[in-house]
Image (cartoon, rainbow, N blue to C red):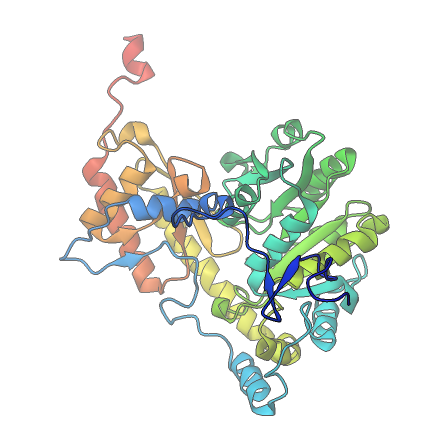
């Protein structure tokens, strides 16, 4: 180093010698008063669900116990516990005392290999290096968007769709373009509309299958049509597959990667829903790099981004091998059987309610219900409708405006069966009370 007081140290900071000590040179100007403002990123971070729900006046009817059909957490009512094998895997991981330290930011190699083996298939094989473990599926989505997109780019997001995509993208200065799903076609993608949104700044297409909030499951043929559009325009896909394999009997749900010959795919998943442990915060990204399009740079970008948080919970990583390999098939079957039964109860009950149009799901944990607002003149919109439903009947459904899809509401079908039956009865009563026939039907006009 040069003598103190002369020149610049290797860190590029000027120093002066004062009484033989080192002090940074005083800045020429200073702030006149305290002024600490939140960053643009924090100001631009908005969760549409919170924005809408927090603004609602939710005052339940004191004479009726509250039934919340609004929260996508299968553990809320205690009727869907995870399997004993899953709990034992966690206990063993803790007792081993091997997983109390830092893991690599992308996850333990052994844990990544376990996930690779579990999701590998002949059409889309995976190695440990193709897996990045994350703090829940939401962090997986965050990393995937972050590595593919720059400020000013745009991403294509399903509508209705999970609100987190927009929350993350907008905070990063990424534009969101919503492509329509079609309720009359069991929420299939409007392919023409989706393709019309693509331009030279489109850096990612998000496909959620099975769907939150729709509970829909795309057929193999429909997925292939989506891939064809992505291939034609050279747009990579972020496949949100957190509900993979949560599909009703008789319905298949191939992964996007297993059908793709040339479109590179980042598939995001986790333990939260299928294993019924959302609070354990274990997710993953599966890198399906068709034709080496992502290459070294995207992989390295994901590694660097993973270092911002220093990885997923080490204890859950230690338990992963046992969770994935030792959970009995009957546990998955029982969960799906319950969800299907509850969905059918809900669909059948609400199908016969004048003014409501439920769409039968094929998987996940949700059912969407259309409101024919013309028949409910008491209410301005779905938010008003669901707010009043709480006031009168103490049933809380999420207005689909939270998913940018007005005049629908979403029901979570994980509640106990008797609660589902009770809730549907109350919704029926509410609708009968407020339903009005159209005053001027076309028949009236003809006369």
Left or right: where 143 falls relative to 80: right
**x%, y% of residue 261?**
82, 47
Residue at position x 42%, y 50% in the image? 36
Residue at position x 31%, y 48% in the image? 54
Asked whether residue 86 is in view, the answer is yes
**x%, y% of residue 68?**
31, 57
Asked whether residue 247 is in view, the answer is no
Residue at position x 32%, y 31% in the image? 373
Q: Quadrant of the N terminus?
A: bottom right
**x%, y% of residue 98?**
63, 87
| Viewer-closest of 132 and 416 | 132
| Viewer-closest of 314 and 205 | 314
Q: Residue furthest front?
A: 19
Left or right: where 108 falls relative to 371: right
Q: Quadrant of the C terminus?
A: top left
Q: Residue furthest left?
A: 63
Q: How many marks?
A: 0
Q: Residue furthest right?
A: 291
Residue at position x 72%, y 64% in the image? 131
Left or right: where 321 falls relative to 185: right
- On screen, residue 257 above or below 128: above
Q: Residue furthest top?
A: 447
| Viewer-closest of 216 and 232 | 232
Left or right: where 181 falls relative to 427: right
């Amino acid at each position: 180093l040069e003598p103190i007081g002369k020149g610049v140290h290797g860190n590029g900071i000027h120093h002066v010698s004062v009484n033989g000590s080192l002090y940074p040179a005083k800045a020429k100007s200073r702030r006149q008063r305290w002024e600490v403002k939140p960053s643009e990123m924090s100001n631009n971070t908005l969760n549409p669900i919170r924005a809408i729900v927090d603004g609602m006046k939710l005052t339940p009817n004191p004479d009726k116990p509250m039934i919340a059909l609004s929260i996508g957490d299968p553990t809320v009512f205690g009727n869907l516990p995870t399997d004993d094998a899953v709990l034992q895997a966690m206990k063993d991981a803790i007792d081993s005392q091997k997983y109390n330290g830092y893991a690599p930011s992308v996850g333990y190699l052994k844990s990544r290999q376990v996930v690779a083996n579990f999701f590998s298939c002949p059409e889309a094989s995976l190695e440990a290096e193709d897996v990045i473990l994350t703090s829940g599926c939401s962090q997986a989505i965050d990393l995937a968007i972050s590595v593919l997109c720059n400020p000013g780019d745009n991403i294509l997001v399903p509508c209705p769709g999970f609100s987190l995509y927009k929350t993350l993208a907008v905070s990063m200065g990424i534009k969101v373009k919503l492509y329509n799903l079609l309720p009359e076609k069991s929420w299939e993608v409007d392919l023409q509309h989706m393709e019309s949104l693509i331009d030279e700044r489109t850096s990612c297409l998000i496909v959620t299958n099975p769907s939150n909030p729709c509970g829909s499951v795309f057929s193999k043929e429909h997925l292939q049509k989506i891939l064809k559009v992505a291939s034609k325009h050279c747009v990579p896909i972020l496949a949100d597959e957190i509900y993979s394999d949560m599909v009703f009997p008789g319905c298949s749900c191939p992964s996007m990667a297993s059908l793709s010959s040339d479109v590179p795919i980042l598939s995001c998943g986790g333990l939260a829903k299928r294993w019924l442990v959302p609070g354990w915060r274990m997710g993953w990204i599966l890198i399906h790099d068709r034709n080496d399009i992502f290459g070294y740079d995207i992989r390295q970008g994901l590694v660097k981004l993973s270092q911002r948080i220093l990885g997923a919970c080490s204890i859950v990583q230690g338990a992963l091998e046992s969770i994935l390999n030792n959970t009995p098939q009957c546990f998955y079957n029982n969960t799906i059987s319950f969800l299907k039964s509850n969905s059918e109860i809900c669909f059948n009950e609400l199908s016969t309610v004048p003014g409501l149009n439920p769409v039968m799901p094929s998987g996940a944990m949700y059912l969407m219900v259309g409101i024919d607002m013309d028949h409910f003149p008491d209410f301005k919109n779905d938010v008003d409708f669901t707010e009043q439903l709480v006031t009168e009947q103490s049933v809380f459904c999420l207005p689909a405006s939270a998913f940018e899809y007005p005049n629908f509401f979403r029901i979570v079908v994980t509640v106990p069966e008797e609660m589902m039956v009770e809730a549907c009865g109350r919704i029926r009563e509410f609708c009968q009370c407020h339903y009005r026939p159209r005053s001027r039907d076309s028949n009236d006009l003809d006369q």
